[in-house]
């Protein structure tokens, strides 16, 4: 099965290079990512397969949205060419691929040996009772460092793609009206969200600090903490958060995540501990990593929200 | 007694799923934003509540049931509120129907 998939991969690559219609190339790239993802599954790493699937889905959706602003995507895909190129060859290809996947059944118990290994050993190797946290903080912590880096870069990119530069922000001539939260005027919403808002913060902190026991962890808890600050703007209409300090804090937290993870995991500090301190050290490591990741994600989302909604409300003219 | 609990719980969960399917059907069939919001607001709340009640009947009186009944109370309070905020913000922002 792996050989057939690799042959399909090569064929798909050749077709992608030789094709001249951009819309079709986007679709062929999506098919390429799908075949690669199934190939990763067959070779025993389901987490890489999942990451590939998610990444390909998001990039294809992003491309199609950008394409749709100027041309019609479906018209471009089914463009020029005879009936064979437009309908028959894609149909045959889809049927063959679907038939191959259904016949050979790539998801079987022999390909899950890595998953079984993780689930059997994670309590001793990494600690805690949540295998997902053990994977992203223990076995695949390298992935987590790069995921954190991706969050930082995406926040920076989103800020720089915004309409106004920092200099124009500082002179302050462009903001002609104060931002006003419409939710603040609705007494019903204010009354109800006031009750639930502190509970959201508490829930976010609970998710972060208990990431190694229950489902949760740094990323989810950080989002819940950020939603508290977003609700605070919505119901009280205050914009008093120091955004430049939050940007600085996010960068410092990211650097500290990297230094902490590298020094503990890659320099092997855990191997030199006496046996009775091992478990506390593991749990302390996971707690501190989850807390730092939660803080970083919360800061990232607060920065995005404030930059786009509070400062650039309505796209005011210069 | 346990068999009856499971069968009754399954029936209630199925009814809840049918409610959710009506909501999804409404999203596809209605043409404007406000009517779609209306379809989804009611059916999602009632459907989710029914599924949670079905689960509670299936499990009996345990900690799990307490947790999901708390979740049901929060859902009942805040799901209509969120629909209200959505509709209000769309109306006040002057959301135009041609800009779909």
Image (cartoon, rainbow, N blue to C red):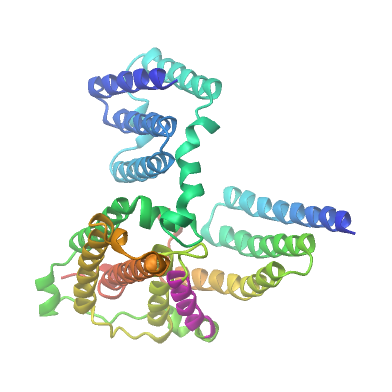
- Name above or below for residue A64 compared with residue A110: below
SS majority, magenta: helix
**Residue A46: % across, % down:** 43, 40
Please identify the quarter of the rendering in which residue A284 is found: bottom left
Can residue B56 be seen here? The reply is: yes
Can residue A286 be seen here? The reply is: no
**Residue A315: % across, % down:** 25, 68
Is A91 displayed left or right of A29 in the figure? Answer: right
Is A206 displayed left or right of A65 in the figure? Answer: right
Which residue appears at 40% of the width and 82% of the height? Answer: A232
Q: Nearer the viewer, residue A262 or A14?
A: A262
Q: Is residue A206 magenta?
A: yes
Q: Residue furthest right?
A: B1
**Residue B5: % across, % down:** 84, 58
- Name above or below for residue A230 compared with residue A10: below
Quarter placement of the N terminus of chain A: top left
Which residue appears at 69% of the width and 60% of the height? Answer: B47
Q: How many numbered callouts?
A: 0
**Residue A297: % across, % down:** 33, 66
Please identify the quarter of the rendering in which residue A17 is found: top left
- Name above or below for residue A24 compared with residue A247: above
Q: Is residue B22 magenta?
A: no
Q: Nearer the viewer, residue A148 or A34?
A: A148
Quarter placement of the C terminus of chain A: bottom left
Which residue appears at 31% of the width and 51% of the height? Answer: A143
Q: Nearer the viewer, residue A158 or A97?
A: A97
Start and end of the magenta stretch? A195-209
- Name above or below for residue A273 compared with residue B6: below
Please identify the quarter of the rendering in which residue B56 is found: bottom right
């Amino acid at each position: 099965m792996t050989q057939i998939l690799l042959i399909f991969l090569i064929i798909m690559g050749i077709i992608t290079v030789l094709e001249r219609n951009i819309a079709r190339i986007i679709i062929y790239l999506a098919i390429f990512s799908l075949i690669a993802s199934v190939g990763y599954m067959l070779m025993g790493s389901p987490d890489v397969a999942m990451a590939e699937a998610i990444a390909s889905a998001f990039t294809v959706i992003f491309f199609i949205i950008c394409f749709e602003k100027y041309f019609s995507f479906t018209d471009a895909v089914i463009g020029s060419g005879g009936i064979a190129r437009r309908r028959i060859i894609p149909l045959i290809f889809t049927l063959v691929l679907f038939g191959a996947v259904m016949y050979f059944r790539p998801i079987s118990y022999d390909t899950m040996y890595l998953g079984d290994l993780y689930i059997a050993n994670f309590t001793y190797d990494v600690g805690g009772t949540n295998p997902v946290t053990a994977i992203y903080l223990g076995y695949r912590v390298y992935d987590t460092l790069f995921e954190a880096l991706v969050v930082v870069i995406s926040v920076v990119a989103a800020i720089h793609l915004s309409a106004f530069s920092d200099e124009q922000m500082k002179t302050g001539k462009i903001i002609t009206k104060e931002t006003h939260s419409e939710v603040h005027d609705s007494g019903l919403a204010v009354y109800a969200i006031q009750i639930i808002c502190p509970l959201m913060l508490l829930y976010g902190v609970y998710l972060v600090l208990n990431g190694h026991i229950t489902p949760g962890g740094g990323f989810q808890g950080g989002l819940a903490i950020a939603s508290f600050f977003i609700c605070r703007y919505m119901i009280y209409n205050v914009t008093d958060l120091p955004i430049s300090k939050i940007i600085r804090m996010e960068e410092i937290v990211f650097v500290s995540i990297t230094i902490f993870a590298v020094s503990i995991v890659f320099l092997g500090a855990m191997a030199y501990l006496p046996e009775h301190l091992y478990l506390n050290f593991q749990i302390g490591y996971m707690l501190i990593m989850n807390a730092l990741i939660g803080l970083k994600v919360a800061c990232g989302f607060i920065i995005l929200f404030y930059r786009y909604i509070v400062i650039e409300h309505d796209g005011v003219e210069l | 007694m346990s068999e009856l609990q499971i069968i009754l719980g399954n029936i209630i969960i199925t009814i809840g799923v049918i409610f959710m399917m009506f909501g999804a059907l409404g999203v596809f069939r209605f043409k404007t934003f406000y009517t779609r919001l209306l379809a989804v607001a009611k059916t999602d709340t009632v459907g989710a509540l029914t599924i949670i009640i079905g689960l509670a009947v299936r499990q009996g009186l345990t900690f799990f049931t307490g947790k999901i009944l708390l979740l049901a109370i929060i859902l009942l309070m805040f799901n209509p509120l969120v629909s209200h905020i959505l509709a209000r913000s769309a109306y006040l922002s002057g959301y135009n129907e041609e800009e779909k």
